[in-house]
Amino acid sequence: SDNASGGGRSGALSPAPLTGDVQKIDVNPPKGTRDFPPEDMRLRNWLFNNFKEVSRLYGFEEVDFPVLESEALFTRKAGEEIKDQLYCFEDRGNRRVALRPELTPSLARLVIQKGKSAPLPLKWFTVGQCWRYERMTRGRRREHYQWNMDIIGVPEVMAEAELISSIVTLFKRIGITESDVGFKVSSRKVLQEVLKCYSIPENLFGKVCVIIDKIEKIPLDEIKKELKASGVSQEAIEELLQVLSLKSLTELEERLGSSGEAVADLKQLFALAEKFGYYEWLQFDASVVRGLAYYTGIVFEGFDREGKLRAICGGGRYDRLFSTFGADDIPACGFGFGDAVIVELLKEKGLLPELGLQIENIVCALDVDLQGAAATVARILRDKGQSVDLVLENKPLKWVFKRASRINAQRLVLVGSSEWQRGMVGVKILSTGEQYEVKLDDLN
Ligand SMILES: OCc1cccc(Br)n1
């Protein structure tokens, strides 16, 4: 290290005299949260740029909302985990607010706010950070970024088919194929049709779905106990659990008959999947209900076929969300695609992209009187759209070459006194070692 006191970071100032009251801060981010240093930020930008490019290909418009929302947006009474883990507090104006745990309620709020000024159908997307306050006993993350795509105002199953198509397109763009992942697809209308036969009140529907979504996470006896406590009869519970084990549309049709909407919707979706070209990616699985109370129809989730990871993405139809905010209902469907499981999958598959830093030029004055000249050279190159790392200090060439290698610069532009007098600069192509002089005007 070349700083006066030795030790510590190279280039750091010699430490200020520590007064008694200065505490060393914890340089780690808050529990459950992440920093994105340059290498991680390059991977995140690569992933998010793929999200945004697919959204553009599908004609979706980007929207955004505050990460902080009124708590009331998320206080649904259906026993959802997302509500139990709400990152909420009272602000200085005594308002109950929350860090958003998901993006759909914000989207619905904005759609209602825009009213007729946003003619239907709307195809909106966003990539946003979502939060949950989970006790760190499980050491899970408290924040993640989600890509959301939503189609508002289309009641037909074509909307769900289009959304799944966009996710297939994303997977293909990053090298994931149907041999790596698939989509489990079902419809909450399956549950609705079963519950209707047992005259379960409508307002219980969301809660029953949330309980059933835990079927692979908690013991079956616990599921039955929670269903019973919610007012579902023993007979209805038995019937529900049998229907949930169905693994083919044929079995479902035999069970529910062919006249119901659940079978019709799912048949339509599989037929469209054929046309969209992703039939092989789908499988019917009656046990898929998803954990958000507001889904009302088709639901789907992307899963890794090796079964090592949590769901990669998930979504579905939510035709009754708007009325829970006091507005007229609007048919809608959408999905969320998180930024964590997909990276775990890419690691598993050896598909993480190589994303080294790439700078075109490193520009350096050979003596301190030429710093201004070096700045001029940097400006000329930047005006031509070239990236330049301008050496800002008076450093020995050995240091410059070391930095050039670290930042993966393509070429070194040296501003030396005799060359500058002749309107020239020195250039060294760092990959080949080729070296030459060039007139400043011809530098490009
Ligand atoms: O997918 C549930 C969820 C919501 C917010 C933050 C995180 Br991490 N996970």
Image (cartoon, rainbow, N blue to C red):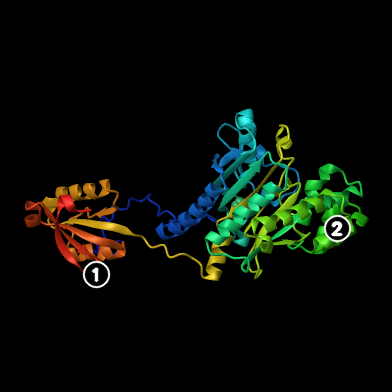
Q: Residues within 10 Å of mark 2 (few under 14, many from 20)?
A: some
The number of numbered discs placed on residues in the rendered structure image is 2
Task: For residue 98, say whether it is visible.
Answer: no
Mark 2 lies within 8 Å of ligand 1 (Cβ measured): no
Residue 280 image position (x, y, % from top left): 68, 64
Q: Residue at x 28, y 65 (%)?
A: 405
17, above or below 105, in the image: below
Marks 2 and 1, how far apart in space?
A: 68 Å
Residue 224 image position (x, y, % from top left): 85, 58
33, above or below 61, in the image: below
Q: The N terminus appears in which quarter of the rendering? A: bottom left
Asked which secondary structure carries label 1, the reply is loop
Q: Amino acid at mark 2?
A: Glu
Mark 1 lies within 8 Å of ligand 1 (Cβ measured): no
Q: Which mark is residue 112?
A: none
Residue 329 is left or right of residue 370, and the answer is right
Residue 132 image position (x, y, % from top left): 61, 50
The residue most toward the top is 116
Q: Residue at x 19, y 50 (%)?
A: 377
In this view of the protein, which residue sits in the foreground, 17 or 127? 127
Q: Residue at x 82, y 45 (%)?
A: 204
Asked which secondary structure carries label 2, the reply is helix
Task: For residue 437, say whether it is visible.
Answer: yes
- What residue sits right under mark 2 in the picture? 253
Q: Of the residues under marks 2 and 1, which one precedes in the sequence?
A: 2
Residue 285 is left or right of residue 339, and the answer is right
Residue 168 image position (x, y, % from top left): 60, 58
Q: Which mark is residue 432?
A: 1
344, above or below 130, in the image: below
Q: Amino acid at mark 1?
A: Thr
Q: Residues within 10 Å of mark 1 (few under 14, many from 20)?
A: few
Could you say which quadrant of the image residue 222 lies in?
Answer: bottom right
